[in-house]
Amino acid sequence: MTRHYVDKTAPDLGYYEVFSGLLGYRWQWREVAKGVEYLDCGEWREKASQAYRDAADDWESNGNSSNRRLGGQLRAAATRAEKEENADG
């Protein structure tokens, strides 16, 4: 799946990624601060669109308020995923 960065020119600032597994889909946040890697994961969801919306909610409640663009990117990814899910039947 696609990584959604806070800033593509500085990937260690962090990114969200939605991935699939046996239990469905979930988001993962990764960042590196002072040489230490931090990971956080959301709950498993049935659909990718749900995981993207959860990631957007997580960013909007925990992220840097100066970068609202990332939440919008994640919500747009949720909309795209939902269209694909609905097209698949």
Image (cartoon, rainbow, N blue to C red):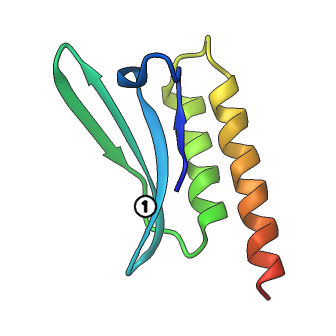
Q: Is residue 65 left or right of residue 18?
A: right
Residue at 38% x, 81% y is 22
Q: What residue is shown at x 53% (from left), y 17% (from top)?
A: 64
In the image, residue 61 lies at what x, y percent?
55, 31
Rendered image quadrant of residue 60: top right
Q: Position of residue 65 (x, y in %)?
A: 60, 15
Residue 39, relative to residue 27: is it above or below? above
Position of residue 48 measured from the top left corner of the image (x, y, whole percent): 60, 65
Q: Is residue 1 above or below residue 37?
A: below
Q: Looking at the image, which residue is at 57% across and 51% down?
A: 54
Q: Nearer the viewer, residue 20 or 2?
A: 2
Q: Please name the amino acid that badge 1 sits on.
A: Glu
Quadrant placement of the C terminus: bottom right
Which residue is farthest left? 35
Residue 11, position as x, y percentages in the image? 41, 24
Q: Secondary structure at mark 1?
A: loop
Q: Is 73 situated left or right of 62 in this image? A: right
Work out whether 62 lies above or below 78: above
Mark 1 is surrounded, within 10 Å at the Cα level, by few (under 14), some (14 to 19) or many (20 or more) other residues, namely: few
State the residue at coordinates (61%, 41%). Answer: 56
Which residue is most to the front?
9
Marker count (numbered) = 1
Q: Which residue is mark 1?
A: 43
